[in-house]
């Protein structure tokens, strides 16, 4: 290699680095524009509020109670 070739390679590399730096600043956002915002969530507390008395009362339907329809003692209904 000649000294001219080495100098040309260095000049081309410097030019390519400057060019890529300028292009990347145009294409990608700056640090100020990359700030993300998140929703603020209320912390969990140990306080328990009583449920609504119109829904949760002693006369309400219990969905966990076994409901039988008819007088069958068949252990295999299906």
Image (cartoon, grey):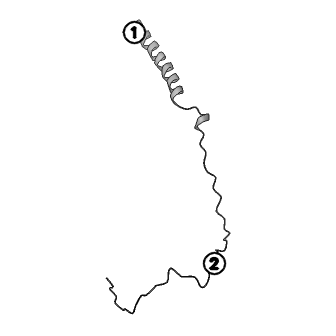
Q: Residue at x 58, y 37 (%)?
A: 34
Query: Mark 1 — residue?
Result: 5
Q: Kindly identify which numbered label has been placed on residue 54.
A: 2
As drawn, 5 above or below 54: above
Task: Depth check: give the residue in front, 39 or 17.
Answer: 39
Q: Residue at x 51, y 23 (%)?
A: 21
As drawn, 1 above or below 25: above
Residue 31 image position (x, y, % from top left): 59, 34
Residue 25 image position (x, y, % from top left): 54, 26
Q: Quadrant of residue 44?
A: bottom right
Q: Which comes before the other along the chain, label 2 or label 1?
A: 1
Residue 7 image position (x, y, % from top left): 44, 9
As drawn, 67 above or below 55: below
Q: Residue at x 34, y 88 (%)?
A: 75
Residue 8 image position (x, y, % from top left): 42, 10
Front position among marks 2 and 1: 2
Q: Secondary structure at mark 2?
A: loop
What is the crowding at mark 2: few (fewer than 14 residues within 10 Å), some, or many (at least 20)?
few
> Disc 2 to disc 1, how far (Cα)?
89 Å
């Amino acid at each position: 290699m000649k000294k001219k070739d080495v100098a040309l390679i260095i000049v081309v590399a410097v030019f390519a680095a400057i060019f890529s730096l300028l292009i990347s600043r145009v294409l990608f956002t700056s640090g100020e524009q990359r700030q993300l915002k998140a929703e603020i969530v209320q912390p969990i507390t140990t306080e328990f509020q009583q449920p609504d008395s119109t829904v949760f009362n002693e006369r309400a339907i219990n969905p966990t109670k076994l409901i039988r329809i008819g007088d069958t003692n068949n252990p295999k209904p299906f």
